[in-house]
Amino acid sequence: MKVLITGATGLIGQEIVGLCHQSEIDINYLTTSKDKLISEKNYKGFYWNPSSGEIDVNCFEDVEVIINLVGATVAKRWTKKYKQEIIDSRVDSASLIIDSLKNIKHSVRHIVSASAIGIYPDSFQNYYRENSQERDTGFLGEVVTKWEAAVNEFETLDIEVSLLRIGLVLSNKGGAFPKIKIPIEKGVGAVFGNGKQWQSWIHLNDLARLFMYVVKEELTGIYNAVAPNPVSNERLTNVVANQMDKKIILPNIPRFMMKLILGEMHVLLYSSQRVSSDKILETGFQFHYDNITQAVGDLV
C-alpha cells in the first residue's frame, strides 16, 4: 500500500511516518518547503502551495489512502489575519487535493483526516459522543465545522472519509505538554481557573496508532481521538507535578489575566470538553495509555 500524507513533517505526521515504515507502507508526502523534499524508495516528497493553488500531481501516483494532517497551529495569537490563515490552511488544502483528483486518473479510495474536539461546546456537564449535535459557537467551532465540511467533499468523488476529532495531544517532542511541564519544572506551574475544566487527552503514540488502525481496518465516519479517561485541568497539572516530584504552590490563574495576555486565544486554556472514546473502543482498538498517570509517567 502507498499513502499520501499532508503534514508529514509535523509532530503527529512524524510519528505516523515511523509506523508506516514499520509496516512497510510506502509514503508520498506534500510539503510547502522545497528544502524538505526527500526522494527515497519508500518516502518521497512533493511540493505544493495550497494558498496559490500549486501542487505536483505526481504525488497521487499509486496512492490508495490520504492521511490529512495539514493546518496552521491554533496555539498562536489570534489576530484577524491569523484566524483567516487557520481556516484557509485547512479548507484550501482539502479543496486543492479534490480539484486535482477531479482532473486525473487516480487510485485514491479513502481519506483519513485530522479534526478536533474544539467542535464541541465548552461544558462542565456534557459528555460528547460523535453523534452529539451541539456545536461550539466560537472561533474553534467555526474552524472545525469548515474543516470537516471541506474534507467531506471527498465523498463527491466516491472517496470514503474518516474524521478523527483529536483532543489534547501529550508528547515530550512538542505540542502542549512541554508548555505544561516546563513551568512546573521551574516551580511556577499553576492550575487555570477553577481547574474543573475537562481535558480530553491522548498520548501521541496512541494517536498515531489510531490513524494507522483506521487506515488498515478501513473504518469510515467520525471518531473521537481521545483516551478513555478525561481528567480535569487540576488533576492533569497535579499528576505532572507528582511525576516530577514537584509541588504546585502558586494560586490558580484567573481567566481574566490570561485573556489580557493571550486575547481570544485564552479559551484554549479554559474551555472544557469531556469527550467519549467509546466508538473507537467498540471497534476493537486498544489504547496503550488509557490513564493520565501512566501517560505522563512515560513522558517525564
Image: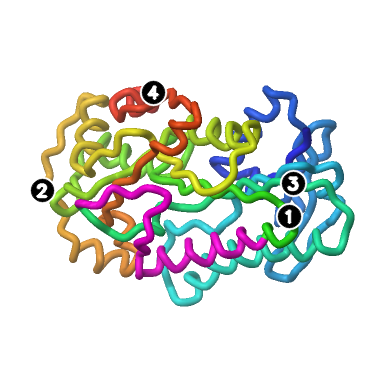
For the residue carrying disc 2, how many other residues have a C-alpha within 10 Å: few (<14), some (14-19), or many (20+)? few
Q: Are marks 3 and 4 in contact (CB under 8 Å)?
A: no
Q: Is residue 85 left or right of residue 97?
A: left
111 drawn magenta: no
Disc 4 is placed on an element classified as helix
Q: Are marks 3 and 1 in contact (CB under 8 Å)?
A: no
Residue at label 1? 158
Q: Quadrant of residue 47?
A: bottom right
Picture residue at 20% right of the left edge, 51% below the top: 125
Q: Label 2 vs label 3: CA separation?
A: 52 Å
Q: Quadrant of residue 92?
A: bottom right
Depth check: give the residue in front, 206 or 39.
Answer: 206
- Which of the numbered marks, if any, corresponds to residue 251? 2
Disc 2 is placed on an element classified as loop
Picture residue at 23% right of the left edge, 31% below the top: 239
Residue at label 4? 298
Q: Is residue 78 left or right of residue 182?
A: right
In the image, residue 254 above or below residue 285: below
Magenta residues span 125-153
Q: Earlier in the sequence, mark 3 or mark 1?
A: 3
Q: Position of residue 190 (x, y in %)?
A: 19, 45
Q: Position of residue 14 (x, y in %)?
A: 61, 37
